[in-house]
Image: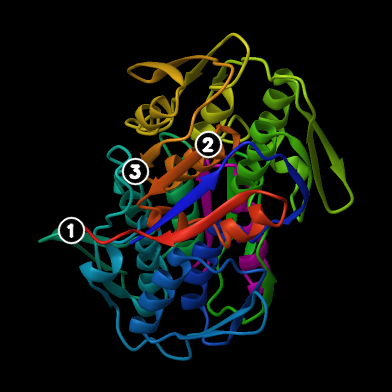
Amino acid sequence: MDRIVIQGGTRLDGRIAISGAKNSALKLMAASLLTDEPLILTNMPRLADSRFMGHLLARLGVRVEEGPGAQMQLHAAEISDTFAPYDLVRKMRATFNVLGPLVAREGQARVSLPGGCAIGARPVDLHLKALETLGAEITLTEGYVEARAPKGGLVGGEVDLPFASVGATEHTMLAAALARGETVIENAAREPEIGDLAACLTAMGAEVEGAGTSTIRIQGREKLDGITHAVVGDRIETATYALAVAAAGGEVTLDGAVWAHNKALWNAMGEAGVTVKPVENGVRIERNGARVKGVDIETQPYPGFPTDAQAQFMALMSLGEGTSVIRETIFENRFMHAPELIRLGADITVHGNEAVVRGVERLKGAPVMATDLRASVSLVIAGLAAEGETVVNRVYHLDRGFERLEAKLSGCGARIERQAEPAES
């Protein structure tokens, strides 16, 4: 098992290329099940999660080939199996999104209930209710979902989500693309990844309107085409490197970052005293000298402050002048990074879904333990700003969501390297 070792106290200067969005790429990969023609995805992130999804799709009969650069070709000429076993679905929740496309194309599927991060319950009942609205008959048996479409296939319907679930919105869109007639999703999620999936499905031949608003309409088609589609830049990777520069100090341009996708974060960083500005094909982050100020934030569905940047922002606020209050409204149990930041010298008190962060003048390096993907990278950010050596253990979480993290940071002057953890004696 690997660990990351950081010698802190070095400012960051240079450029970082932002990879394609993980949360978009995984659903786009699932879209390959909707056509018997090749789907070519460019700007694909090379991550553990995309490899997991590729293994599952291959099990279902999709030919998955990684091309030059950041390209992946997926060709589901025939679906050889509609069974997605526990061993391949338990590793992450996004794999559950093969259910809708399989039922839409093949009329039936048997898919394990998902595993994934230990962040709250995160049930999939909204996904199943949406598929039932499109006519699927759903049965739960021994940890598996068995779904069967009516004779003639899925039929469009009105899916009214009780809250703006990203996963349920995307899953409904995927299934509806091959359903007969119109599907309307009310209270749909508005994240940029939804717009990316909508653009891909529309290019494949479905008609998707309203992505980015709370009402999405999908006109399904009997057959979809293969296309080439570029994955949108990752707004969470953008947020992470922006906050790393803010914490360590320096001047970095994030190439491929989309300014419009992180406005709530840019506002909070601006309040903290960090300079953030759009540049051609990217975003520029600057902090020179002055200590950041404490800022209160509350996570909200897009376009509010993203829950996936909350841990990273807490790392920055641990060095802020004054007190900041961070309120988590999306997921329960998402302050697992707080005790590890405290090991580095942060002053953080957690009460339920609220963390009070009293900024300290400096952090000091220490061994810490990663507990999930976003917590892992918050510890890296803190380590970059801390005095001395920080060792982040259990970094396999990082590989799920960050491509070449050490290389990207070291290219801007960070003293960071990956090492194999020493064997226990």
* Residue 422 sits above or below residue 105 on the image: above
Quadrant of res 224: bottom right
Quadrant housing the C terminus:
bottom left
Quadrant housing the N terminus:
bottom left
**Percent position of residue 230, x then y:** 69, 68
384 vs 148, left or right, is: right
Considering the numbered disc 3 on the image, is that residue within a helix, a strand or a loop? loop
18 vs 21, left or right, is: right
Q: Amino acid at mark 2?
A: Gly
* Residue 392 sits above or below residue 355 on the image: below
Residue at the image point whose x is 60% and y is 44% from the top: 191
Between the C-alphas of marks 1 and 3, the distance is: 24 Å
Q: Is residue 195 within the magenta segment?
A: yes
Quadrant of res 391: top left
Q: Which residue is labeled 3 in the image?
A: 371
Residue at the image point whose x is 38% and y is 51% from the top: 130
Label 2 neighbourhood size at 10 Å, few (<14), some (14-19), many (20+)? some
Residue stretch in magenta: 177-206
Considering the numbered disc 1 on the image, is that residue within a helix, a strand or a loop? loop
Compare marks 1 and 2 and give the one earlier in the sequence: 2
Label 3 neighbourhood size at 10 Å, few (<14), some (14-19), many (20+)? many
Q: Which residue is labeled 1 in the image?
A: 425
Tell me the mark number nearer the camera, choosing from 1 and 3. Answer: 1
Tell me the mark number nearer the camera, choosing from 2 and 3. Answer: 2
Considering the numbered disc 2 on the image, is that residue within a helix, a strand or a loop? loop
Label 1 neighbourhood size at 10 Å, few (<14), some (14-19), many (20+)? few
142 or 17: nearer the viewer: 17
